[in-house]
């Protein structure tokens, strides 16, 4: 059974989410806005198309003039000019004449059809028309795609390539959206060394800060990796406070357990908004969350074991980043898959096991039901190699101690965009 002084994963999740609020919207150029959440309802200031225009290269005509045209009985009309896209000089068409016209060019007043080149002899001074278009055929009508005043992008819409293209097409150069959050990442531990330097018999390379900074960037944030902080509370506090000027969120790893050298807990326990404790999960039991500094910048303090740090990021930090950005859903959605090998778990703790998740192709709507997940490695929170070989986390509920092969489980697909 779980210890009485532990809190559950949902309760700690709520603590984390209560510590962050969506960032204030600001104006971004369309080049900067990709991937951000729109913070306004954008109404079109012009219609699309904004004028009637040709959908084919050919000849603008009055449809009644060419009705009944066939190869055996063609219609011949004088060509009185040419209209190119962006170079329109002919504003009106007289009955009994034709105007050469390019795709996208505005059709002149009086024209109600375009005859494609393929239906003609492509004449210059005059044109022979072998097939009659229907009225309005090969003409894109003004406003048939978007009407002036229509909301083209709604608030909270994630601005992807298609939305950016639409905004540009209706003339918007900037859009109000929530910015990318600035996430400061640092690792604590006097035993840590930067990759590329030498390590001794009692030191290790710092993989956590690189991993967490990369995870923050993958989530859409601007990540700042800070150098290693030794096990000294004063140095840690000075480093963190120096970083607050460029932080919307601070994420630390290490120093939150109950040992003599748990510098993060020792340095921040006096902060009125900080909470440190144990969460009923494996890996990732020791956790902390709160706010620091004059601006009450949120800080999430993760455990130091690499798998614990990464799992904690996925479960708690990723949703916090998405809330800062105004993106929903906050948490990565759970998928269902059939377990290929049996797994065991500890009663009272939510287990996050590494897994290899696969969805067979070619099975249509049954794809999700036919998905499988294979456990990768053991439950150890130090096994970074197994983590790197995984693409999913298998989630075993607190009340379940064993899941047999072939049974369905919930899965967090780590590489899935959502």
Image (spheres, rainbow, N blue to C red):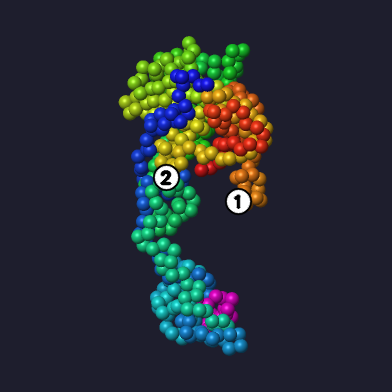
Specify whether residue 117 is painted magenta: yes
Please state the horizontal and vertical placement of residue 375, each as a whole percent of the image: 64, 31
Residue that appears at 38% across and 56% down: 151
In depth, the one of 186 and 60 nearer the eye is 186
State the residue position of label 1.
365
Q: Is residue 243 visible?
A: no
Q: Which mark is residue 284?
A: none
Q: Is residue 259 visible?
A: yes
Residue that appears at 46% across and 19% down: 4
Residue farthest to the bottom? 73
Please state the horizontal and vertical placement of residue 109, each as a whole percent of the image: 40, 77
Q: Quadrant of residue 328?
A: top left
Of circles 1 and 2, the one toward us is 1
Q: Is residue 151 above or below residue 100?
A: above
Label 2 CA crowd tier, 10 Å (few <14, some 14–19, many 20+): many
Q: Magenta region: which residues?
A: 114-126
Residue farthest to the left? 294
Task: Tell me if 104 is positioned left or right of 242 in this view.
Answer: right
In depth, the one of 168 and 4 nearer the eye is 4
In depth, the one of 65 and 287 nearer the eye is 287
């Amino acid at each position: 059974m779980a210890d009485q002084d532990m809190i559950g994963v949902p309760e700690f999740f709520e603590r984390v989410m209560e510590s962050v609020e969506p960032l204030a919207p600001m104006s971004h150029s369309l080049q900067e806005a990709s991937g951000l959440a729109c913070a306004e309802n954008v109404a079109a200031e012009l219609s699309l198309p904004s004028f009637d225009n040709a959908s084919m290269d050919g000849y603008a005509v009055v449809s009644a003039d060419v009705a009944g045209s066939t190869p055996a009985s063609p219609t011949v009309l004088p060509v009185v000019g040419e209209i190119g896209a962006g170079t329109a000089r002919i504003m009106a068409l007289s009955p009994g004449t034709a105007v050469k016209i390019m795709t996208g060019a505005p059709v002149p007043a009086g024209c109600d059809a375009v005859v494609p080149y393929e239906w003609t002899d492509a004449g210059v001074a005059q044109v022979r028309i072998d097939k009659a278009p229907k009225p309005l055929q090969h003409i894109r009508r003004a406003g048939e795609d978007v009407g002036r005043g229509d909301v083209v992008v709604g608030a909270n819409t994630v601005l992807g390539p298609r939305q950016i293209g639409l905004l540009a097409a209706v003339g918007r150069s900037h859009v109000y959206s929530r910015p990318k959050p600035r996430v400061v990442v640092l690792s604590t531990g006097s035993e840590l060394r930067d990759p590329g330097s030498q390590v001794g018999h009692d030191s290790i390379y710092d993989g956590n800060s690189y991993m967490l900074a990369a995870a923050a960037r993958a989530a859409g944030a601007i990540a700042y990796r800070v150098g290693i902080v030794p096990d000294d509370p004063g140095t840690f506090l000075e480093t963190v406070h120096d970083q607050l000027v460029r932080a919307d969120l601070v994420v630390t790893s290490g120093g939150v357990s109950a040992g003599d050298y748990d510098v993060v807990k020792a340095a921040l326990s006096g902060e009125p908004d900080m909470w440190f404790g144990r969460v009923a999960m494996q890996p990732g039991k020791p956790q902390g969350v709160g706010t620091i500094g004059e601006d009450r910048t949120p800080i999430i303090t993760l455990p130091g074991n690499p798998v614990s740090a990464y799992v904690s990021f996925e479960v708690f930090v990723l949703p916090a980043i998405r809330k800062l950005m105004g993106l929903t859903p906050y948490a990565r959605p759970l998928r269902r898959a059939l377990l290929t090998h049996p797994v065991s778990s500890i009663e009272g703790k939510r287990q996050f096991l590494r897994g290899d998740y696969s969805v067979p192709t070619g099975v249509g709507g049954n794809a999700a039901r036919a998905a499988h997940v294979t456990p990768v490695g053991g439950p150890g929170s130090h096994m970074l190699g197994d983590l790197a070989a995984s693409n999913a986390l298998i989630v075993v509920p607190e009340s379940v101690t064993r899941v047999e092969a072939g049974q369905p489980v919930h899965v967090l697909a780590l590489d899935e965009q959502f």
